[in-house]
Image (cartoon, helix red, strand yellow):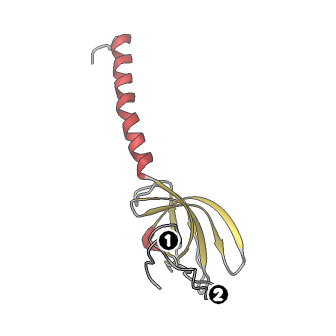
Amino acid sequence: MGKIGRKNWIGAFGGAMLMAAPLAAALAQAEKRCDLDAYTIDEDPKGISVRATPSNQGKIAGVIRVQKDDDVGVAIVAESNGWFRIKSYQTYSTNKETKLGGWIHGSRLGSSLMIMQGGKASERLREEPSDRSKRCCC
């Protein structure tokens, strides 16, 4: 293998960095930030794998163990292609919150939506965040 001169090495390194920058930007854009809660619906006795990256091939960052007949909620901070990034989880029976950052696939999660509280007619699900917006349902 021939020697690479300093100038050529810097050029090759700079070119690689220029190619890596758009890739990193594309990956960052794919992640949509949010702030919501969900609960686990996977009853696998081995637990739910929390991954370091949003992929089945991602390194396992931790495991959420779910006891039979217990509910576990997760705090979601982002979504990317059906994967949800969590910052913590909480076991409802003990009300204990555990910090654990990583990704869980959406097929392992469930959620619910409270449309009306107290039966007020003004509380309706709307197409846009405005009282003048068209109602979606209810």
Q: Secondary structure at mark 1?
A: loop
Q: Position of residue 14 (x, y in %)?
A: 38, 23
- Image quadrant holding the N terminus, namely top left
Image quarter of residue 80: bottom left
**Which mark is in front, 1 or 2?**
1
The amino acid sitting under disc 1 is Arg
Relative to 1, residue 94 above or below = below
Judged left or right of residue 29, residue 33 is: right
**Where is mark 1, residue-wise?**
132
Q: Relative to 83, is 70 on the left or the right?
A: right
- Work out how far the residue at label 1 is from the one at label 2, CA to CA, in angstroms: 21 Å
Is 45 drawn above or below residue 20 in the view shown? below
- 43 and 127: which one is in front? 127
Identify the residue at image location x=40%, y=64%. Answer: 82
Q: List x then y, in percent, for residue 47.
A: 53, 73
Identify the element where label 2 is drawn. loop
Within-10-Å neighbours for mark 2: few <14, some 14–19, many 20+ = few
Marks counted in the figure total 2
